[in-house]
Amino acid sequence: MIRFILLQNRQGKTRLAKYYIPLEESEKHKVEFEVHRLVVNRDPKFTNFVEFRTHKVIYRRYAGLFFSLCVDITDNELAYLESIHLFVEILDHFFSNVCELDLVFNFHKVYLILDEFILAGELQETSKRAIIERMGELEKLE
Amino acid sequence: MALSGMRGLSVFISDVRNCQNKEQERLRVDKELGNIRTRFKTEKGLTPYEKKKYVWKMLYIYMLGYDVDFGHMEAVSLISAPKYPEKQVGYIVTSCLLNENHDFLRLAINAVRNDIIGRNETFQCLALTLVGNIGGREFAESLAPDVQKLLFSSSCRPLVRKKAALCLLRLYRKNPDVINVDGWSDRMAQLLDERDLGVLTSSMSLLVAFVANNHDAYWSSLPKCVKVLERLARNQDIPQEYTYYGIPSPWLQVKTMRALQYFPTIEDPNTRRSLFEVLQRILMGTDVVKNVNKNNASHAVLFEALALVMHLDAEKEMMSQCVALLGKFIAVREPNIRYLGLENMTRMLMVSDVQDIIKRHQAQIITSLKDPDISIRRRALDLLYGMCDVSNAKDIVEELLQYLSSADFAMREELSLKAAILAEKFAPDLSWYVDVILQLIDKAGDFVSDDIWFRVVQFVTNNEDLQPYAAVKAREYLDKPAIHETMVKVSAYILGEYSHLLARRPGCSPKEIFSIIHEKLPTVSTSTIPILLSTYAKILMHTQPPEPELQNQIWAIFRKYESCIDAEIQQRAVEYITLSRKGAALVDIMAEMPKFPERQSALLKKAENTEADTAEQSALKIRAMQQSSNALVVTDHHPANGTPPVSQLAMVKIPSISSVDHNTADQVVTPENGALSVVDPQPSEPSVDLLGDLLGPLAIEGPPAATRSEDNSVSGVDGSSYVDEALALAPVGEDANTIQPIGSTAERFHALLLKDSGVLYEDPCIQIGIKAEWRAHQGRLVLFLGNKNTAPLVSVQALIMPPSHLKIELSVVPETIPPRAQVQCPLEVINLCPSRDVAVLDFSYKFGTQGVNVKLRLPALLNKFLQPMSVSAEEFFPQWRSLSGPPLKLQDVVRGVRPMSLSEMANLFNNFRLLVCPGLDPNPNNLIASTTFYSESTRAMLCLIRIETDPADRTQLRMTVASGDPTLTYELKEFIKEQLVYIPTTSGGPTAAPLQAQPTSPPTTVSDPGDILAGLLH
């Protein structure tokens, strides 16, 4: 199960944070700080997995942005690693050539997309088309 | 498209981005927060658009890491907005800002439910998403039926159904009782026939959660899973949009194989054959390709298939195929694949018969120990540790030692502990073991815990052959410049004891030994000085005939420390100088340390304890327990490997006869070297760290007899030898309950009053954990009985002695707990009527020849049947008045209250689920709390409590308790009183450690060192 998802830039600014477990505010800040420190200095040639407390962080870097998923120690690492990429492909499709600024100014859209992709810490939909179509429906309602 | 579509929001975001520094940003954010706060407060008629804008801004500010402590209400209230745009904001922001424990969330339950049962599909989706992401227990109880309806509704689009499936999963995780297993068996199988892959993916996650808890109810889903897997693996009827880089949904494949791993086996031969065909196809058909995404996706499937093959205990041929594949993976350059190769190989060690094949890859694995990536290094270390046995211990330990000097700090402690354990377990000869430990101290002294050097001293003391060798080595290390303080300690100790064995060698005369050790004295801390003083005293004693020059030198040092501020050092200095004037008596008293009684290695114990910790965590997740690659488990699972579970370095046994002579003689006639024992004479205190007494920090301790009663509690790995000793020494104690609890059982009980999971009892053999869930008048407890040893616990019995007000049903407890296994015993509790009485668990088991019986209070007290309840002034006062006096309302003055501030008291009340309602009582020194009590006879009943404190005298207060039931009022009042005056007892109090049989310590062997010392000095 995914415990939380973080999108952070190199400086450690949080661009998106979604927690599927109940954490206190102070704990969230701590987690965000620690995860950033953990992933930011890793060599690109290293694995995409790092142990984090009693869990594992699966992360991937796209330009200056780090996408990190915290999952259970026994979860399938590569499957979650590719779910990050699928999410990025969806964002890329939705914003047509996504960049960090898109995510900053449209953070609320990113939350919406994420809610169509992952729910209760589990993958909900893996079809890019289904999610993009769904976003289209929702845009019309606004 | 970089604009948000809301101008105010975009402007604000730009402003924040344009800030030059953190200070400016804070100013801008504070300004905005101030603005939002006033708008929310003063303007009642905010348009929905404005509200929406402000709430988004709040979320943005929150994301930047600022505290947003207001506006939650506004966000929640948007949930009930009639139009989609506002409602959507309400839902999203609420699920980011609040978590399931937040009180505001309760306010939203009704609105959320209305959206779920309403006709608007979009609203349904929003509501399901919120509940799926942050729903808690209360949501589970009130919404589960509605959500299930949506999941099976034929009129709902897949869009809604997949959300309903995962929403239900969340609710199930919060409270498994919301699913009625009986009806679900068929429904689950039906869900797996789903054609829509979105719904199927979500349903598969749901199945994984179900089977992880109880696979028995879902056997009918097993063939369906295999069908799904076949369909995917053969790419039959999979829409293009569900293939990812040409691979039919890798995620669904992985999930399906994960679900299959929760079934212990596959009985039906046809299903089994089909599954193995698919698995074979995956194992053989996965190639390394250029495209990284495709590669990752196909290997995600492959690794899951490997895990499933291991789980199913496939034929040897397929297993060797797997090992061959893994062997390939650990040699590739791609770091992720290499990491997973190592990790899975470690898991593979649990499967029999493959150890030898894995050993062939040892060189490759050692290379990974030097990988620049710490994640890979850790995996390599785990694997090396797991695969170590007598045949390769020398190589592996030497590699670890070599690596130690270059290893990063984060890993050194683990590394040195593992090296020490392996050296102890698998040493081909003892001198090698001594070499390894000394090297460890030399290379990573900071990371070598005391246990490690205590252990080497034990071995040297107990093995005469080893003593000259150890002394030579210690002497050699002292020649090195700048040695670690731990090295000073261990070499000073060893040379104090055994340097006389080297006397004829060059550089080893007493004088030379003394001066080389004394050179180090200015560099060491106060904890080492006592050891050095003891060494000097020993050197002096061994120098026969005495050398006046050396004697004067050493006496001068003792005299210098006679007035040392450190009590330990001072005492030794004073004692040694007095003793050394006694001439021949010195020799008696300062003679060589007697052999240590054989005991379990504290290192192994330590490692076991860390393991027990993980096991407790994973009690929640069975899977994690089965699969966590804890190398320690692994080695101990392979006794067949030629590795006896007992340490290879089993110490020389002390013949029981001589030991008896020795002890009785010493104790009665001359107190020999027990004389100076300053070891805290508290034989009743169970010693947790049994090595701690080695030097704690005294170099001279009582003969083994003085500690013998404790030693039994270590449940010697080699039971027979010391059972004899125990018999000889203390015939009365033979049947005594010598396995002692670790930690205070009473304290554990009190801690569990306030929380629902934790450890109820622990001793060297067993750990009993408990996890409870309470709902109204019912409770569901699970006892986790974990065997910490490598031998089974037998004659396990658990009886519940319930008080009359509780109905308790305990499921069957197995008679034997296999080595290192954990069994779970569920327990159903029903509260019939109010009472403070305590249920007791009468638990017994046998380990080897020792029987243990303990009576443990179960944390199923009155407060567990309370539900905190917040009341307003309008609700409180009429109720309070209507309950006019005894017996429904009782008042009592409580004295001897343990001192605490009012806020501490409020905390205490809240912890006991008595919700303090601030502001109800006009007097700030008073507290009002309310709660609902549940029992079968009273049903739900409101209880009100008022506490009046006296600021001048915190030890007394007046308490008034009111409820609609006289017994409840009385019992609750007494319960609170007990909690207010309860003072945590450390141990030994009447409530502490309800052990049936206290250990009987041998009466003749307990001697107060103080008395003996006094006698000597006169």
Image (tube, coloured by chain):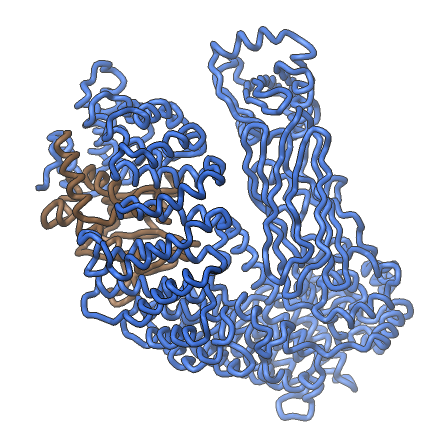
Chain colours: A brown, B blue
Image location (x, y in percent) of residue B867: 53, 26
How many dots with numbers? 0
**Residue farthest to the front, as pictured:** B270
- At horizontal 73% and vertical 45% (from top left) the residue drawn is B842
Quarter of the N terminus of chain B within the rendering: top left
Image location (x, y in percent) of residue B997: 80, 50
Q: Is residue A87 left or right of residue B487?
A: left
- At horizontal 54% and vertical 65% (from top left) the residue drawn is B633
- The image quarter in which residue B87 lies: top left
Is residue A78 depicted above or below B538 in this figure? above
Residue situated in front as seen by the camera: B56 or B388 = B388
- The image quarter in which residue B751 lies: top right
Is residue B570 depicted above or below B31 in this figure? below
**Residue farthest to the right, as pictured:** B669
Image location (x, y in percent) of residue B683: 78, 56
Residue situated in front as seen by the camera: B680 or B76 = B76
Image location (x, y in percent) of residue B846: 74, 58
Q: Is residue B405 visible?
A: no
Q: Is residue B550 left or right of residue B28?
A: right
Quarter of the C terminus of chain B within the rendering: bottom right
